[in-house]
Amino acid sequence: MTGAASPRRAFFSASLGAAAGLLLARRAEATDYATAREALDAMETQAAEVVARLRALCGVPGARVFCERLLVAHERQRSERGRLRGRLGLPAAAPAPPAQVDRSLAGLRAAQEALVFAQAEGLPALPDGRAVDLIAHQLVVSARQLTLVDLWIEGEQARA
């Protein structure tokens, strides 16, 4: 392992550990979803806000490629959740109303964090192991994206 890889691996491990810590700290105020439909609806709502914010940030110089990559991942997750809904006999997700969002990184971070929480809090409402596995994998991707947004914010603060 090279010297550069070791600190990077340690940073990402610490970041994922911090995301897990946030989830545990928030447990006292966690949403208790009664059904898979309720949990998936919450995920769709939160994901729609993240997507709206990423689209708004695509216009920021230097952010387009990053935002587009995250948008591709969000589209893949939306499609996976749609297939899960079909397998579970649930109706398709309602179209998200157009969100009025700003281009703030803080707003993107808050929306991404809310998505991570919705995914984590929705796991107990899912009816089988396949559904849990799918959403757990999406949770890991979302937590990684949250870490990348945090790095973006840190980079902007360092430049200021």
Image (cartoon, helix red, strand yellow):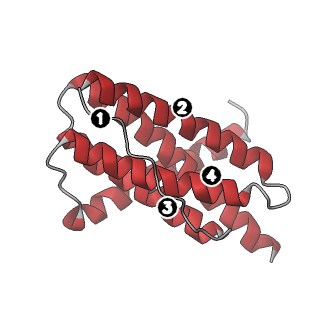
Q: Amino acid at mark 3?
A: Ala
What secondary structure is marked by label 4?
helix
Look at 66% across and 58% down and name the residue there. 151
Q: Residue 148: which numbered mark, if any?
A: 4
Give the quadrant of residue 82: top left
Q: CA distance from mark 4 to mark 2?
A: 18 Å
Q: Amino acid at mark 4?
A: Leu
Mark sitting earlier along the chain (1/3): 1
State the separation of the CA atoms marked 3 and 4: 14 Å
Q: Amino acid at mark 1?
A: Pro
First in sequence, mark 3 or 4: give its number: 3
* Marks 4,2: beta carbons within 8 A: no
Please count the marks in the image. 4
Q: Residues within 10 Å of mark 3 (few under 14, many from 20)?
A: many
Going by the image, does 153 lie left or right of 110? right
**Residue type at numbered disc 2:** Arg
